[in-house]
Amino acid sequence: MGGGEGTRAAPLLSGQAAEFAEQFRSYLLREKQWKVLMEFILRHLPDYHDLPNGGGCLDQLLSLSMVWANYLFLGCSYNKALLDKVMEMADGNEVEDLPQFTTRSELMKKHQS
């Protein structure tokens, strides 16, 4: 992950799809973060649209997008299978200026040294 911001998102961010995605924007996300999160959502929206009987697929996509955003931007940890899934879904998303986090394990190793 890295490279130019929004290079793949530009075509996705136009029209009705972007307007639809905007309703899920969190006021806590900075503009850069929202752009990559919206790219994630819009990329997978065709595969996760809600079924006519209320299957809740859109809720699942939004949850997966927040797992990805929380992992990247807040340093949250998740089980390996879930994290592997969202990282695979995010393959190709370009994200700049990611914060650097120190894990609890890394802190414990430094403390023991």
Image: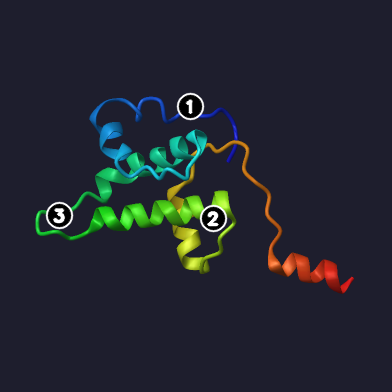
Write down the quadrant of residue 3 in the picture.
top right
The circle drawn on residue 7 is 1
Q: Position of residue 110 (x, y in %)?
A: 84, 66
Kind of residue at badge 1: Thr
Q: CA distance from mark 1 to mark 2?
A: 22 Å
> Quick check: 58 above or below 43?
below
Relative horizontal placement of residue 90, taking residue 43 as reference (left or right) = right
> On the image, numbered disc 2 is attached to which residue?
71
Write down the quadrant of residue 35 in the picture.
top left
Furthest toward the front, the residue is: 27
Q: CA distance from mark 3 to mark 1?
A: 31 Å
Q: What's the coloring here?
A: rainbow
Which callout, 1 or 2, points to the residue nearer the camera?
Answer: 2
> Quick check: 102 above or below 73?
below
Give the residue drawn at x 71%, y 58%: 102
The numbered mark, 3 or 2, whose residue comes first in the sequence reads 3
Kind of residue at badge 2: Tyr
Q: Quadrant of the C terminus?
A: bottom right
Give the residue drawn at x 48%, y 45%: 91
At numbered mark 2, what does the secondary structure look like: helix, strand or loop? Answer: helix
Which callout, 3 or 2, points to the residue nearer the camera?
Answer: 2
Write down the quadrant of residue 8 in the picture.
top left
The circle drawn on residue 61 is none
Query: Of residues 74 and 82, which is closer to you in this image?
Result: 74
Furthest toward the bottom, the residue is: 112
> On the image, numbered disc 3 is attached to which residue?
51
The numbered mark, 1 or 2, whose residue comes first in the sequence reads 1
